[in-house]
Every structure is written in C-alpha cells, then in structure tokens.
Amino acid sequence: MPAIAEPAIVVRVAADAFDIAREIAALRTLAGVGAIVTFTGVCRDEGGTLAALELEHYPGMAEAEIRRAAEEAAARWPLAGISVIHRFGRIAVGDDIVLVATASTHREAAFAAASFLMDYLKTRAPFWKKEHPVAASGGWVAPRAEDDAAAARWGKMKGPRQERDPSVT
C-alpha cells in the first residue's frame, strides 16, 4: 500500500522526559491526517518491587535502527508521520519510557504501524534494561518469549535480536 506522501519521521533517543501533547500536536499539522495513534510505555512498579529501570543503548546505532524500522512501517502502511521517542538512563517508576505515535488518513494504518513499531522496539531495538528493585540488587532483563511471539505476526523483522552479554557489568 503506498504512503500518503513521503512521511515525516521523527526518531529521538534522549535521557530527558518528552511532552506527549507536543508530539501529537506536531503530527496534527501534517497533510492528510485523519487518525493519530499513540502508545506510551510507562515504567511500572512490578507489584511494588521495582524502584526504577536503567536503560542503555548504543548512541547513533539505536537511532539508525529505529529509523530503519520506521521506514519499514512507512513502506507497509500509508502514513503521514511517525514519531518514536525512547528514553535511556535511569527511569523512575511512573515515568514515561517510550512514545510511538503514527498518523495516517485512516485509523487502521495508524494502529497497525504503531503496533508494528512497538513490537520492533520490544524485540529488536538495541536497548538493554536493568532492573533496580526496591529491596535488592538488580539484574539485566532477559528477552521475553511473549514479545518474540507478538513480533512474529509481522514476518521477518530487519535487525538482529539484541541481547546483553551477562558477563558485562
């Protein structure tokens, strides 16, 4: 399905919090927009056991890989715009971690593209998460089979599966 036009793609990896309303407002200005779908990932407390998450990434590589996934989404669905913002560093419980926002003429494309991008971020993006529990020392978060199963519905995704070497501290 061809895109509306060359979609506007914004990819940012930053330590600072992002403004969801500002990101949505930017997508509203694009031609042909009739639907904007957003997903915001929030650091959850895991039943009161988690104090924070620490996210690491490869600067430059992370942005390039996320952009590649956004371009793939734009090739699959008719999108006017895509915004993907991912934080790194120490993220406190309740703070936003990631924003995926997609804009299209109709909702179906925007929903599908946002879901595709989140599945990519959960399974292929070069980020590593370390948990900081409330009452103990933390550890690196292993890939989850359910995330891989969710991503499998899109066919082969570009980019290697990113796993942290547990021997590296």
Image: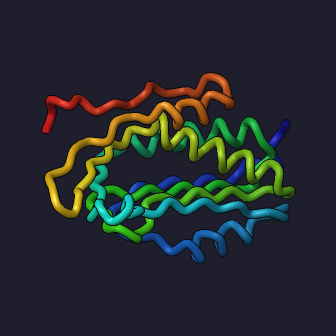
Which residue occupies 55% across, 39% down?
Answer: 120
Frontmost residue, 23 versus 120: 120
In the image, is 159 to the left or to the right of 168? right
User: Whole-percent x and y of residue 26?
Assistant: 65, 70
In the image, is 59 to the left or to the right of 38? left
Frontmost residue, 91 versus 146: 146
Q: Is residue 4 above or below residue 71?
A: below
Quadrant assignment for the C terminus: top left
Which residue occupies 66% across, 50% down?
Answer: 114
In the image, is 146 to the left or to the right of 95? right
Q: Is residue 99 above or below residue 150?
A: below
Which residue occupies 38% across, 58% down?
Answer: 46
Frontmost residue, 49 versus 17: 49
How many dots with numbers? 0
Farthest residue toward the front?
47
Quadrant assignment for the N terminus: top right
In the image, is 161 to the left or to the right of 99? left
User: Whole-percent x and y of residue 123?
Assistant: 48, 35
User: Whole-percent x and y of residue 96?
Assistant: 44, 66
User: Whole-percent x and y of residue 37?
Assistant: 71, 60
Which residue occupies 59% across, 69% down?
Answer: 23
Q: Is residue 75 above or below residue 113?
A: above
